[in-house]
Amino acid sequence: MTETLTKIVVDCSTGEQTIVPLTAEEIAQREVDAAAYATAEAEREAAAEALATLKASAKAKLIAGEPLTAEEADTLVI
Amino acid sequence: MTMELISTVTVGAGGAASIDFTSIPQTYTDLLLQISLRSNGSGSYAEEPLFIQFNAAGYNSSWRLLNGNGTATYSSTGTNAEAGAVTNSVGTSNTFSSTQIYIPNYAGATNKSWSSDSVSETNSAGAGQTGQKLTAALWSSTAAITSITIDALSTNNFVQYSTASLYGIQKGSGGATVS
């Protein structure tokens, strides 16, 4: 049996709290929003990984006395 | 300045996918939402995002987030009203995230800025395992805020003993003037 998703609704004017099932539309929207979040999170992680790679390369080149690319230099110079 | 509890919620044994504060009184200056959450979500990470909606208008706040964990920091932006982190089932057992959301001038007729200070809790360092998130956001609506909804991710639930408390902040009338 599929568990029914519910929300707690608090009426701040009376203090009454009720438990209400989510509608199919609400559930569908949550899944769309979750997919959008997953996409954005993957992009963030990829960007962070790319930056870390550039920084490591820039550092190695500095130590070896080799020229940096403009992208590598951007990670070190503010 | 005075701070008054408007309403508080504690999630019961059945869990809750959302907590919705409605009919918020319009008599305060600012609002403060204090939240302690854990979800039944799972996956690679010990935390997942907390989402916030105003007036059931969807996730349409633009924000910038500063995140720090045990090994790194990063900054990111978005428009889906991420308001902080929720410790999930991957995190240390019986451990809940802690989030404070401040909404100044919520009843006014200008766009609504809000800020969040959130920390997920787990006994592990590294990306996605635990972190502190500072968020600065803007809900681009001139409508007064009459309801606030906090949502778990996707079809996940906030588990039992998760809590959310809404406070009204009233500006004071006294205080010294420094010249």
Image: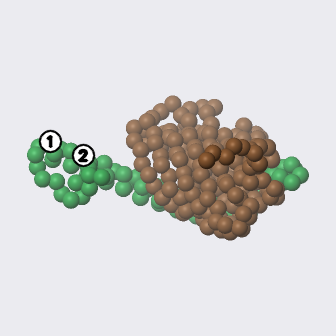
Chain colours: A green, B brown
* Residue B68 image point, x, y percent: 46, 42
Determine the chain carrying the residue at label 1.
Answer: A
Residue B164, by quadrant, is top right
Q: Are marks 2 and 1 in contact (CB under 8 Å)?
A: no
Q: Secondary structure at mark 1?
A: helix
Give the labeled residue for mark 1.
A63
Q: Which mark is residue A56?
A: 2
* Residue B61 image point, x, y percent: 59, 62
Residue A26, by quadrant, is bottom right
* Residue A37 image point, x, y percent: 52, 58
Q: Quadrant of the N terminus of chain B?
A: top right
At label 1, counting other C-alpha atoms closer than 10 Å, the crowd grade (few under 14, some 14-19, many 20 or more) is few
Residue found at x 26% / y 52%: A77
* Residue B72 image point, x, y percent: 39, 41
Residue found at x 21% / y 59%: A70
Residue B138 visible in this rendered orientation of the protein: yes
Image label count: 2
At label 2, counting other C-alpha atoms closer than 10 Å, the crowd grade (few under 14, some 14-19, many 20 or more) is some
Determine the chain carrying the residue at label 2.
Answer: A
In the visual, does B19 lie left or right of A44?
right
Foreground: disc 2 or disc 1 = 1
Residue found at x 50% / y 39%: B130
* Residue situated in front as seen by the camera: B144 or B89: B144
Residue found at x 52% / y 41%: B132
In the visual, does B158 lie left or right of B73?
right
Position of B101 relative to B26 (above/below): above
